[in-house]
């Protein structure tokens, strides 16, 4: 049995895939697309399949062209993403445009994927806009955004928009079980908690955070009990985040040591070391930020369930149905729960503004205790 094509590996977006395959069949791609929808539902995976199909009609996934695009090594494929948890910088776009305007190889297209395009800084966005207004021939831009409202309006207006919706929880559960060999009960729970966001569900199911829900609920709904609990939980979360990235950090240290040995004596050695070290720190920050986003996702799911309980909704509709007895013991009004959800959302915005995670979560847990 042959391997499925890159198109066939995309689940739950049949209509969108059909639209894009039609574009390939007609060989009439637009110069720019904007894929938008919730985080972690397959937008980037679809963008990568589309990029491959622009250079291999079937997007077979096994030919040299497809494999090099998936590995980000194809000479006519370029992938841009935020540096760490920061924005996409103007320097990144300037470097990109230098190669975009070079002559492409015969046949196929030069393709650029800009992931998390809502993170384009103002200068970077305006620099990219000039090229989108006068696009080079044979170049296709695919912008991927989890928040279209934060994409510069003039950039969005230059793109053909392709909307993506969250997947059905049953589909997400099936993906986790079949593709990632995750236990069925854990897969079902992660799918329900993440509301159709398969990328988030995969990380949640594999990351061990599900076991922290009782402790998280206890601290979030504490009243005048242990005043030290919010601080202790915040510190524990930071420690877990550091531990989760420790293997990556060790690998980075080895990589940096090998690089230093290779460039030792070069007049550019100091600059190379500084640049690589900065990139590694940004990567660690990005990984830690993903963990913190998972914590907020869990917190929000718990509070949404508390809201359902406070309004006497059938327990079968709870995402955290396995914790129903514990949540039913929490005394909170709908107004208090909505206030808690607002605090959780604000913490996400504070982390995006680079507020220190320890301070952000400590303040969150104290605030949630106050409204419980």
Image: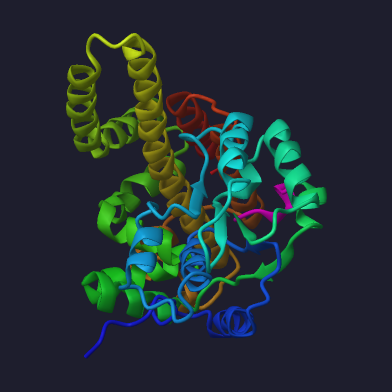
Q: Nearer the viewer, residue 107 or 362?
A: 107
What residue appears at the point 70 percent right and 43 percent down from the top-left corner?
A: 128
What residue appears at the point 48 percent right and 55 percent down from the top-left corner?
A: 77
Q: Quadrant of the N terminus?
A: bottom left
What residue appears at the point 17 percent right and 25 percent down from the top-left corner?
A: 258
Q: What percent of the width, then of the height, locates residue 283?
A: 38, 34
Residue 180 position (above or below residue 208): below
Q: What percent of the width, then of the height, locates residue 223?
A: 47, 37
Give the number of marks.
0
Q: Is residue 158 left or right of residue 113?
A: right
Answer with the quarter of the image where residue 259 lies: top left
- State yes or no: residue 147 in magenta: yes
Q: Is residue 190 visible?
A: no
Q: Is residue 49 visible?
A: yes
Answer with the quarter of the image where residue 148 lies: bottom right
Residue 245 position (above or below residue 281): below
The range drawn in magenta is 145-151
Q: What percent of the width, then of the height, locates residue 257?
A: 19, 21
Q: Is residue 239 left or right of residue 146?
A: left
Answer with the quarter of the image where residue 264 lies: top left
Residue 311 position (above or below residue 281): below
Q: Is residue 149 left or right of residue 67?
A: right
Q: Nearer the viewer, residue 213 or 257?
A: 257
Q: Nearer the viewer, residue 236 or 32?
A: 32
Q: What percent of the width, then of the height, locates residue 73?
A: 37, 52
- State yes or no: residue 241 in magenta: no
By what rule are the colours in the image chosen? rainbow
């Amino acid at each position: 049995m042959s391997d499925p094509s890159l198109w066939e590996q995309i689940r739950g977006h049949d209509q969108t895939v059909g639209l894009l395959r039609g574009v390939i069949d007609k060989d009439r791609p637009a110069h720019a697309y904007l894929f938008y929808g919730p985080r972690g539902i397959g937008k980037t995976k679809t963008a990568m399949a589309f990029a491959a199909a622009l250079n291999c009609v079937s997007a077979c996934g096994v030919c040299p062209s497809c494999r090099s695009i998936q590995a980000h090594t194809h000479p006519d494929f370029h992938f841009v993403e935020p540096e760490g948890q920061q924005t996409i910088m103007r320097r990144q776009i300037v470097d990109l445009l230098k190669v975009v305007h070079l002559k492409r190889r015969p046949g196929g297209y030069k393709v650029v994927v800009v992931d998390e395009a809502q993170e384009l800084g103002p200068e970077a966005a305006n620099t990219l806009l000039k090229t989108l207004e006068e696009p080079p021939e044979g170049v296709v831009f695919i912008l991927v955004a989890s928040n279209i409202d934060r994409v510069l309006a003039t950039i969005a207006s230059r793109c053909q928009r392709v909307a993506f919706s969250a997947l059905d929880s049953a589909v997400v559960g099936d993906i986790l079980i079949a593709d990632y060999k995750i236990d069925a009960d854990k897969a079902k729970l992660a799918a329900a908690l993440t509301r159709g966001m398969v990328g988030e569900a995969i990380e949640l199911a594999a990351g061990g955070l599900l076991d922290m829900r009782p402790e998280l609920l206890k601290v979030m709904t504490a009243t005048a009990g242990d005043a030290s609990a919010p601080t202790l939980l915040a510190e524990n979360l930071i420690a877990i985040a550091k531990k989760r990235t420790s293997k990556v950090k060790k690998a980075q240290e080895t990589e940096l040591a090998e690089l230093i040995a290779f460039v030792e004596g070069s007049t550019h050695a100091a600059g190379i070391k500084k640049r690589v070290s900065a990139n590694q720190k940004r990567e660690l920050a990005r990984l830690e930020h993903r963990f913190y986003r998972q914590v907020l996702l869990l917190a929000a799911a718990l509070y949404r369930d508390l809201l359902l309980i406070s309004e006497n909704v059938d327990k079968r509709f709870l995402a955290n149905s396995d914790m129903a007895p514990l949540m039913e013991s929490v005394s909170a009004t709908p107004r208090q729960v909505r206030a808690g959800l607002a605090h959780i959302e604000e913490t996400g915005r504070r982390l995006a503004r680079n507020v220190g995670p320890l301070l952000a979560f400590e303040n969150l847990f104290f605030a949630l205790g106050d409204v419980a």
